[in-house]
Amino acid sequence: MKEKREMPSLEEAQSQFVKNSVLYKEFLAERAEILKHKWIESEKAGKDIGFEKALLDWIVKHRSNWRERRRKEARTEKAAS
């Protein structure tokens, strides 16, 4: 007996497309770095510094170097494949 599969709804298909997009993956990677920075800086301060302060601090101090490192890693991976 064959199992009947329903086609995914338009919303589910769009959601899956977004989750698989490079842009969304970059967003998640950047957000993870900001949260890591928030944790480190909160530990240094002895209190939660909040997401907004961590975000602004990370953008000013680390974002450009982080992005450049990601670009270099992506180029290296492409060259290796």
Image (spheres, rainbow, N blue to C red):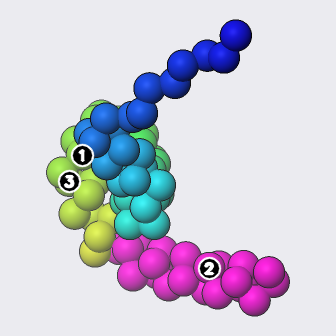
- Viewer-nearest of discs 1 and 2: 2
Determine which quarter of the picture holds residue 43.
top left
Callout 3 amino acid: Lys
Q: Which mark is residue 31?
A: none
Above or below, 2 relative to 8: above
Rendered residue at 42%/33% (across/down):
7
Q: Are marks 3 and 1 in contact (CB under 8 Å)?
A: yes
Q: Which residue is mark 1?
A: 51
Determine which quarter of the picture holds residue 72.
bottom right
Label 3 SS: helix
**Image x and y of residue 19, in percent:** 42, 50
Q: How many marks?
A: 3
Q: Which mark is residue 53?
A: 3
Q: Which residue is mark 2?
A: 74
**Image x and y of residue 11, in percent:** 26, 39
Above or below, 6 relative to 50: above
Residue located farthest toward the left when viewing the structure as drawn:
52
